[in-house]
Image (tube, coloured by chain):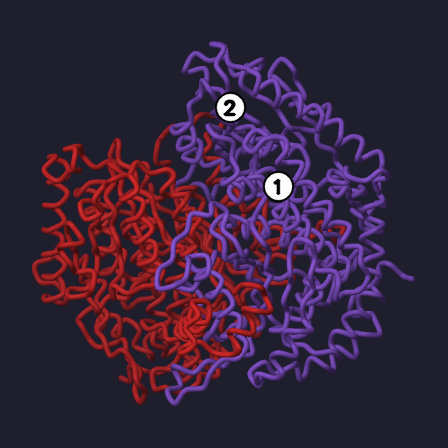
Chain colours: A purple, B red
Amino acid sequence: MRTRMAYNQTAAQERLAGLKGKPFDLTGLDETSFRERMGKYICSSSYFSLYYWSQRLDEEVLVELQSLADECALVRQFQKMKNGAVMNQIEGAESEKRQVLHTACRDIFVEQPCHQEATDQAVRQLSKLKLFLEEIDGGHLCNARGETFTTLIHVGIGGSDLGPRSICEALKAYARPGRTVHFLSNVDPDDAAAVLHRADLARSLVAVVSKSGTTLETLTNEELVRKAFQAESLDPAKHCISITGEGSPMDAPQRYRRSFYMYDYIGGRYSSTSMVGLVTLGFFLGYEQILEFLEGASTMDYLSEEPDIRANQALLLALLGIWNHCYLGMSTQAVLPYSQALHRFPAHLQQLDMESNGKSVDRQAKRIDYRSGPVLWGECGTNGQHAFFQLLHQGTEIVPCEFIGFKRSQYGRDMEVDGTSSQQKLLANMLAQSVALARGEDSDSPNRAFPGNRPSSILLGQRLTPGSMGALLALYEAKVVFQGFAWNINSFDQEGVQLGKVLADRFLKEMAGDKSGGDPLAGFILETTGTL
Amino acid sequence: MRTRMAYNQTAAQERLAGLKGKPFDLTGLDETSFRERMGKYICSSSYFSLYYWSQRLDEEVLVELQSLADECALVRQFQKMKNGAVMNQIEGAESEKRQVLHTACRDIFVEQPCHQEATDQAVRQLSKLKLFLEEIDGGHLCNARGETFTTLIHVGIGGSDLGPRSICEALKAYARPGRTVHFLSNVDPDDAAAVLHRADLARSLVAVVSKSGTTLETLTNEELVRKAFQAESLDPAKHCISITGEGSPMDAPQRYRRSFYMYDYIGGRYSSTSMVGLVTLGFFLGYEQILEFLEGASTMDYLSEEPDIRANQALLLALLGIWNHCYLGMSTQAVLPYSQALHRFPAHLQQLDMESNGKSVDRQAKRIDYRSGPVLWGECGTNGQHAFFQLLHQGTEIVPCEFIGFKRSQYGRDMEVDGTSSQQKLLANMLAQSVALARGEDSDSPNRAFPGNRPSSILLGQRLTPGSMGALLALYEAKVVFQGFAWNINSFDQEGVQLGKVLADRFLKEMAGDKSGGDPLAGFILETTGTL
């Protein structure tokens, strides 16, 4: 079986290309056909049910998508990845040549993990973290005045920021009493000013996160934070910890009270279940909760090894996305959580998806002639209904939607108005949107007509807990990885961010008056825009 | 001059359709041509400079875009709108038939405003607000214990939420000491629980915002808030104020301590400069600051009447958008503020743009056969650089970008690292991204090559202040309106949200056990998904 074949080289390709001409018509759904599809197009796991009756497909398409998955050996590649194959590479070109082992961080609940060595490393860091958290709780690790730490300021950017930040926001309802977390990422000095303005520095730990120990924004913000401590006569070395690669410039006991390690087989955007996310989550939620979080992720990783696309949620989501994007021609993908706690989760997914699959070169270093990753975007419902849903229903751009919802609220503080609770209103709206997008509705006034035939899926869980959050995270990680395999691209590098860095450096050298490294064009732009 | 002609019915259409085949090649820019374009493609106003040298156009295209603007009478329609014409209507179909007068709210700095009556109404509300704020400051309007109010909880959704929320976030640096604002929008009960958890209710005012006084989410959240006050033995009527239409169910002195009015000639998404935004902004920032905010908006409204597209920023942005979307075929538009304070501004623009122009029917009630509004999305730089910029540079989807930046920070708390300040790093990165996207770069390794030719604009201001925030808001409002005129659609209604509401109501009736208004299909879905 060839394991590096793109979706459009399969035998299924031709049949799918034929089927895309007359995709299933959702506007014609009567009650009988509706009930039939509702019964068939559900994929359930221990954490979520995935309803996909409102996608524009039928049995024929599903059979071909299964063939596509089989021919491209998507699950087999996923297993190879978990087992430690060097998946982050491009044949015939310079590339990172690394293993991809974010799944090993959470593969700690079985006797024989898929990759023993990486899991051993993860377990060692976890033990160190457990001890660290106990020392904080017990007051052994405290500030110069002997007071406990109440606040953690997480300094990182991109993969060292969006995942941990969105998960902390999602699980705020489970925070330990008296514990606060702030995030600082942007090089914009106003970001730091706003965070430092709010934080009680004397009671704050600062977790500086950078694998290389050389990220411009993070080092700059660290300096700003250290200055702020000094301005309050506090010794930064007593407050700072680092999460970094072993041996990096940030692996330095004289500057950091403790260092936790991350490994080069885990890319930034896949690192939320490594120390990058766990140190901050552990401080915020406690050790037991992060174990539950990891267990959710690990469970989903094993479920993602199922070869039947109708029984593998991540694989199914991946294939539905490819059907909509590459066959039905939709440019974007909306993710719409009907859960305010997930308000930053689309931003994390945006990074995970677009940085992984926004590529134009395949794994044999050839330019591809098909579409890879879509633009992913989204905001929470019901808010979005009062904002951009107008375009979803009646616009000229067709946007496939993934709804995410939960049957129960986190806080359980709810009340009935007009016979239903807020949580019921939330769910009723989500379900109604999916039906409205699919079926549409005629009207004598053309401006009040709904064309329908707009595809969506619903991912429905019991409640957003640390466990289901872990599962949700791993579900989308696997989805993105499956899509990358199907497009035969390397979802694990990010060469596309390099040019901007190089050019920014030239502008900075001009600004600093360093004539050796700048360039005349940068100088000219700075002068013209008055930004020198 | 016909004033309701779509862009593709103009004489310019044919010429533009010809020119789109060979749009200007940005990758070929050498230093000389670069300098020439930099000198030519700037459009400056008192608040911003708009740089558009990195769009895929040349003089020929600009001449045709000017013709398009003239033939469609875009500026003339804008003036008619400001003067009170009934622009919110569709001929030959039932529609709202309303004036569109959000500009009148800020047209208070000239002797003869464009629409005297609407401006008079705005001034009366402003005077009432001034008095209200003075009473709070002076301690005449206080809680039952005689303490001053320190906190305002703003309850609204959609147009009554995103604008005010994003502007408060943007201007937090100018907040009056000791004043806090919270926003509550989602019907998700966890949203309310999280807000009520943080707020000091005894010292809180609650501003409930709904034009009709009947918005489901807002009324539900108001009830939750009122219950929370009662639970602390506080009388909600002493804490609640309303912003609503005169005579609505929320215009009720026995339930609200004060009511401010909004008028049906201002749509929700255009209402930030009406009482919808100003009550909360006034409490947060003070009366003088909101005058500055209004003055910025009003200045931009007058600048938007300039017929020369090279001297009218809003019109130019509108036409650049149409060039990229309708001629060059790009599906989405990214807005990327290099300013952390603007982190929620793209969400507001998403609503403003997609709810206004996500339409498929023209103003003569005919289905259109061209693309109207794009998907608008975005996040702050430099954060985005570490997230989705990979796709912007190397993905198969081409995304036109609008960068927004400021020369100076808000707090002025900055420091030099490696010879440059954080603010300089921020600007250097923004400028470098624009150059990198445009020029691209070859490489022997295909995975490290940048195709370039990806268009962007830069909007550069001095500093994000209440005044420049007002100007920025009005700039985008005018841009959206100009595009709607060019597409000959009604940018001021939102019929596309109705079907979802109707269906949600059926689900809710099923949930409440009300057999009269539900429907069997809703019941079946609730049963199947276990959400009954």
At 27% from the left edge and 60% from the top edge, which residue is drawn? B210
Helix, strand, or loop for circle 1? helix
Whether residue B232 is visible: yes
Q: Is residue A410 above or below residue B265?
A: above
Kind of element beneath mark 2 = helix
Q: Is residue A301 left or right of residue B525?
A: right
Residue A223 or A209: which is nearer the viewer?
A: A209
Q: Are marks 2 and 1 in contact (CB under 8 Å)?
A: no
Is label 2 or label 1 in front? Answer: 1
Q: Can residue A521 be seen in this snapshot? A: no
- Graded by Cα atoms within 10 Å as few (under 14), some (14 to 19) or many (20 or more), the crowding at tag 2 reads some
Question: Residue B446's x, y, as percent?
Answer: 75, 54
Which residue is labeled 1 in the image?
A: A159
Report the side of B278 relative to B157 (left or right): left
Whole-percent x, y for residue B380 in the image: 48, 46
Q: Taking A438 as reference, is A233 left or right?
A: left
Q: Which residue is mark 2?
A: A223
The verdict on a common chain for dots 2 and 1 is: yes
- Where is the N terminus of chain B found, in terms of image quarters? bottom left
Place of residue A357 in the rendered image (x, y in percent of width and height, measured from the top left): 68, 55
Label 1 crowding class (10 Å Cα cut-off): few <14, some 14-19, many 20+?
Answer: many
Q: Does B311 appear above or below A351?
A: below
The quarter of the picture where residue A264 lies is top right
Indicate left or right for A230 with A161 as reference.
Answer: left
Q: Chain of mark 1?
A: A
Instruction: Determine the residue positioned at 38% across, 82% down.
Output: A447
Q: How far is disc 2 from disc 1 in space, using C-alphas? A: 20 Å
Say which amino acid is labelled 2.
Glu
> Circle 2 marks a residue in which chain?
A
